[in-house]
Image: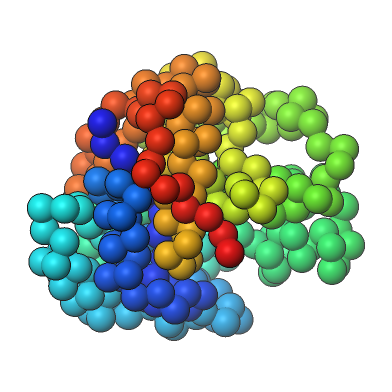
Amino acid sequence: MTWMDYHLHSEHSADSAEPIARMCRRAVEIGLDEVCFTEHYDTDPYDPGYGYYDDARYERRLAAAREKFAGRLVVRKGLEFDFQSRHSDRLAARLADWRFDFLLGSVHNVFGVIVSQAIRDRSFPPDEVYRAYFDEVRALIATGLPHCLGHFDYVRKVSHDLLAGYRYGDYDREVADIVARLVDAGVGLEVNSRYLDAGQPVVPGLDVLRAYFDAGGRIVTLGSDAHDVTGVGGGLGEACRLLREAGFTEVMAYEAGRATPRPLPEAGEALVTPGSRH
């Protein structure tokens, strides 16, 4: 059985200081077989991380890690690009200059700020934030750029404490439309387990995963979204449980943009030491 973590951030992301080698060492220690680093690429000139990503430096460090951990860990090159529709043309042109195994497209911002800030600090109604978020996700899918959509329902993930009245049924038409677009475009879903131990939900939740599966979607990846060694592999067991309950039996691995299905770990098959947040 293959354990994979397809969402990791190292010092090559503006919000992490962790060396790639330390992340890889931790992955080996807990029993992961394959990892994919998905460093942040920020597209908004007003974002603090704008201009931080250095592809040549990233390539060098990945090559060194592959050599160091050869035979013990498969190390893939990925990118998590922040999508804002107003910058989509610039994004597409830039991505064409680089080569990756896996591209994860994520919507983090609406109205110029992180979705949680839009609710908490700028007092936008949650429903308005959700509608704007869904519109950005539709625009992202339409670009055809990502292999997978990152942490779908990011609003619920980072704003769950502000959404006491949230019900899936309130947005079932929106979700049904988006999962249909994902299937038609051949874009998958990442199942993101970051901060599960701190109370953040795994996203997408079971409701969305079932909707995607029922629509014919079969492309899913697993990601802890770790930004340091303590988070590597965190929550992947619960993510697998939700996927199996939704009907999935496989997860995807990527090499040079090509997806290969791998068996979904069975219930009870845990990593040696699940990652945790300290």
Q: Position of residue 207 (x, y in %)?
A: 63, 26
Question: Does 202 sit left or right of 81 as displayed?
Answer: right
Q: Please, is residue 111 above or below residue 51 in the view?
A: above
Q: Please, is residue 20 above or below residue 226 in the view?
A: below
Question: Does 158 sit left or right of 16 as displayed?
Answer: right
Q: Quadrant of residue 179?
A: top right
Q: Position of residue 234 (x, y in %)?
A: 49, 49
The structure residue drawn at horizontal position 25% and vertical position 80%, both measured from the top left corner, is 57
The residue nearer to you, when weighing 82 against 201, is 201
The structure residue drawn at horizontal position 40% and vertical position 74%, both measured from the top left corner, is 18
The structure residue drawn at horizontal position 46% and vertical position 41%, both measured from the top left corner, is 236
The residue nearer to you, when weighing 239 against 246, is 239
Q: Tell me the quarter of the image containing the C terminus.
A: bottom right
Q: Please, is residue 168 above or below residue 35 in the view?
A: above
Q: Is residue 46 visible?
A: yes
Question: Does 200 sit left or right of 81 as displayed?
Answer: right
